[in-house]
Structures are given as C-alpha cells and as structure tokens.
Image (cartoon, rainbow, N blue to C red):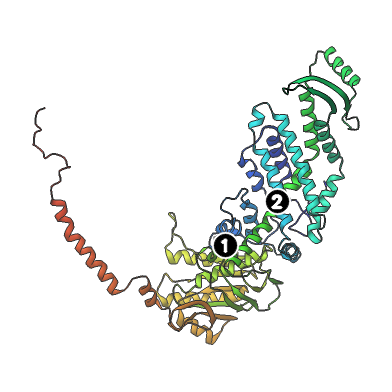
Amino acid sequence: MQPPPDLLEATPRLRLDARLFAETLTFAFATGSSPEAFERVLRSYQPGESTFDAELFARDLFVKDLVSRCLCASPEKRDRYPLLQRPLFALLTHPSTNPQTLAFRHQVLRALTKAPEAAKPVETAWAEIRYLFELFQGGERARHGAAVMRRLDILRALKSTVDKLDDAFAPAVGPLARVRDFTAAVKASEGWAHLVSLLDYESNLATVDVRLRLGHDGEIRSFAVQRVEENQKNPWYVSPLRRFLSRAALLFRGLHVRSSELLGRLVENVFDEMQDVWLHLYQLMLDFEVYLAALRFRALARSKGLEVTLPELLGPADATQSRFERLFNPFLLLESGAPVPCDIEHGGRAITIITGPNSGGKTRLLQSVGLTQLLAQAGLFVPARSARLSLRSGMFVSLVQQAEADQSEGRLGTELLRIRRLFESLPRGGLAILDELCSGTNPTEGEEIFQLLIELLGELSPAAFISTHFLGLAARLEHDRPVELTFLQVELGANGKATYRFTPGVAKTSLARGVAERLGVTRESLRALLDQRRAEWDVTPERESEPTSSGPPLVGKSEPAS
C-alpha cells in the first residue's frame, strides 16, 4: 500500500481502521447504506499520540460546542454538506506535543491564506470527495434492478474526482503537493488503467453511422446503417466470433450468463482493485475538513472585526514568558456584539492569580486561555492577533461544577476532590485552570486551602491560571510571593464598571453590590416585588369565591326533566 496523502502530519500515517473501512464500503457499494453507516469508521479515527486526558478538560471547556458552533458552523443558512465533527473533536481533545507535526499544519494553513483564492482548490476537492461518498448512501436504485448502473455511476464519479484533484493541485507546492503526487500515483497504477478501460468499454462499445430519410410530414421513410465500428482498441474488447464461441461453450455446459452479470463482475473486480484509493480519499476528505473548519473560524472572527493567528510555539522546557495580544473568547463571537479583546502575559512556569468583580470576565478569560492552548496544540488558528505560548504535556480545567444525582460530597467536598485529582493526574509541565476554588466554605479555612494549593502547585511546576475572591490573601501573596506568581485584575472604567480587560495587580473589591444592582437584587427592588406579591395574594381569594356559570352544578341541585 502506498502512503496516504497525509495533510496533518509530516510523516504520512493512516488514521482510520482499514479493515473496518473496507467492510463498510464494500457493503455500501453492493447494497447502498444509510448516513450512519460510516459512523463506526469515524469512531475508529486515531488523531495521534497525545499526553492529554480529555476527561480533565473537555467538558469544562465545552469543546464539543466549540467544534459545532465556532469551527464547523457554515456561513450559509443551508449547508449541503455539513462538516463531520468527530475527527476535529478528536484532534482537539488529543492535542499534539510534536513540534514537527504542528509546524507542518502551520505550513498548510499559511499556504491556504496567502491569497484570497488560495483555499478554493481545497474547498472544491473536498466537495467532490464528499459527493463521491454520498453516492454510496443511495440504495433505492439497487433495490429496483439498477444495481450495476449505480455502481458504474460511482466508478465514474471516482474517475472524475481523481481527475479534478489532479487538475486543482497541479501547481501545488509544499505539503499540498502530496495531493498531486497521490493522484499521479493513482493514475499510474494498474487498477486505474482497468477502471478507465472498463468505463470506456461500457460507454463506447461501438460506433454506428446511420442514414435517415424523412417525409414532408416528418415521418421516417427509410433507415439505413452506413457503418459499424467496434471499439477494438479497448482491452476488454472481444470479437463477435469469440463471443459466440464463449456463449456456445456455456450453453453446452448448461450455463446461462447474462451480459449484465458479466459486467457486474467486472465492476466489482475494478472496485476491489481501488480499495486503497477509496481509503486514502476518505482520509484526505477528513484532512480537508480540519483546514476548512480553521478557515471558517478565521472568517467568523473577521466578521466581528477580530484577527486570529498561528501562534509561536515554545518547547516544554522553555521558561520564556508567554504573551497574548488581543485575546478573545471564541464563544463570544456567537453574541450579537463583538468580544472585548485583552492583552495578557505570564511566566512560562508562573501561577497567575486573577481577581476582580463578579461578572467582570474572569471565567471567560480562563476559558479563552484553555481553548487557545488546545487550538494551538492542534496546529490551528488561535483567537488572538498574536500569541506566544509553550507546549504543554497536559491540561486540567475546573470551571463548571454541576451537581450530580449520585454525588457523595457537597460543594466544598466536590471541589477538594477535584484538587486531589489535579495532583493525581496533571503531568509535570502541564496547564491548570481553576475558577474560584474553595468558595464553598468560610473565608478563613478557604484561604488556608487556597494557599496550600498555591505552594504545592509550585512544586509540580505547571503553568496555572486561578481566579479567586480571596482578595486579602491575594494581596499577601503578591507581597510575599512564595512561588513564581503573576497577578491580573479586572480593569475598571471611569464609572467603576468592568471593562472586561485585565491589568497587572490585585483587585481591591469584588463590586458585589454593583452586580446585585444590575441584576435587581437590592432591598428596594426585592421590597417592591414583595409588595406586588401581597397585592396579588389579596385579590386572589376574592376571585376564587365568585360563582362561575361554567362550573359544575351544586351538589343536591336537580336538573330539570327534559
């Protein structure tokens, strides 16, 4: 088997189960299939080696929503071919730590964005391959006696797809030249020669010249065959005499074979010869979808006046300070307004403590940092105008704490179990993202646990982003600095409200009163609600005591006889 035209890794590799794919495709070719037939094949997708554990971050970062709403969402209202989300989700939940792999993907994306029309060949090729495999899902013609013609249509579509790929990527250089090399190898194969000759034989068995004579009323008066020329150059051609002798021999043996059966057997043989081509085309389609998703994310950000970039990636051992310029949260692109970007810096092994008012954007910032790390180590665009960050060996995220029906601990106990799992699971040099730890107990004990976490995290040597409302403790840590620490606070505007940007330092207040006023939780607003409820309670009994004409008859009251 020749290597696949891999567009995701520097060393070509097959990411699908070849045996499972062959079984699924052969069955679909013979009888047709449902859209769910290839789901098992997609579940076998192997994104590559990764030291990340998806259970430690995927749910809290809403990675599935990122894929479906920010990366795979089509700008068109009706998307003929929605992007398949499972492979992209697998790539994001299994980030790569291989610099060569990430540099290779950056090469592809730079080639696709160097000019406005640079991505057109990829879009066209992806649509052609997607259409090709959509043909396998139609089983109606197979059930109505047109099975051979349906299979021939699939083979014709295969030839057309390879020809169009060859034309589209003829001038390609760099990683995209692998597609051109793939089509050239396919066209030089014996299976391709059989495919071309079979399609030519089926569509060009013979050429017949006829002469017609018409009357004044348009009716045919005479019909004469002038010339018959059989396609003798085709390798499948058999002379009339040999055809007659072959049929006579079969009849002598008591066998009767129809021409459609012979053609069907030839079609199946050619299909089997092209098994590797089918497999490589399907994986190539999935590779195209990864880059199309990245380009859709770029277009979505630009529609809001924001830029994305390919980050500068530092090695895991590099302690250089990381930097994000105009970082934004991808999910905020889905809102009506544009996200507010921010600039942040933090040490390569620093613990960054974030303070500020409620609803000031702390959780959104933590989410942005986590998603940026995943996108960076998937080799895709990150939500920032420029970014420099280190490759991480793993990630632990605790942003969302949802109550479970069978949980044995309360809020504080659940948080402490998450902290324990952090120390059990996060590899050295990983990234930890924690939101408002130990907020479920009294401040004194919560601060003790928080300080213990900070000190021990320093020994694990990860980068960490932690938000907290323990402002007094944060101020003391800023003064003492027991480990390498960075401090960010929510920036406040002239009116005292959060600007959703961040500056170095520790916040002086959480502005809980302002949030309460904004949400209508003040003494005056709650008193007005109580007065309104009392007025409703005073009116309700009077309404209930009024008789209604449509109600049931009183007990003991007899109905008049009819």
Q: Residue shown at 82%/60% (left/top)?
A: 173
Q: Amino acid at mark 2?
A: Trp
Q: Residue shown at 61%/38% (left/top)?
A: 34
The answer, for residue 3, to whether it is visible in the render is no
Quadrant in the picture for the C terminus? top left
Q: Amino acid at mark 1?
A: Phe
Indicate the secondary structure of the residue bearing disc 1. loop
Q: Is residue 311 above or below residue 47?
A: below
User: Could you say which is closer to the camera, residue 523 or residue 161?
Assistant: 161
The answer, for residue 378, to whether it is visible in the render is yes
Question: Disc 2 designates what residue?
Answer: 126
44 with respect to 415 (left or right): right
Which x, y percent locates residue 65? 55, 58
303 with respect to 362 (left or right): right
Q: CA distance from mark 1 to mark 2?
A: 31 Å
User: Could you say which is closer to the camera, residue 150 or residue 65?
Assistant: 150
Q: Residue furthest bottom?
A: 479
Mark nearer the N terminus (1 vs 2): 1
497 with respect to 432 (left or right): left
Residue 57's disc is 1
* Quadrant of the rendered image containing residue 95: bottom right
Indicate the secondary structure of the residue bearing disc 2. helix
Which x, y percent locates residue 84? 63, 51
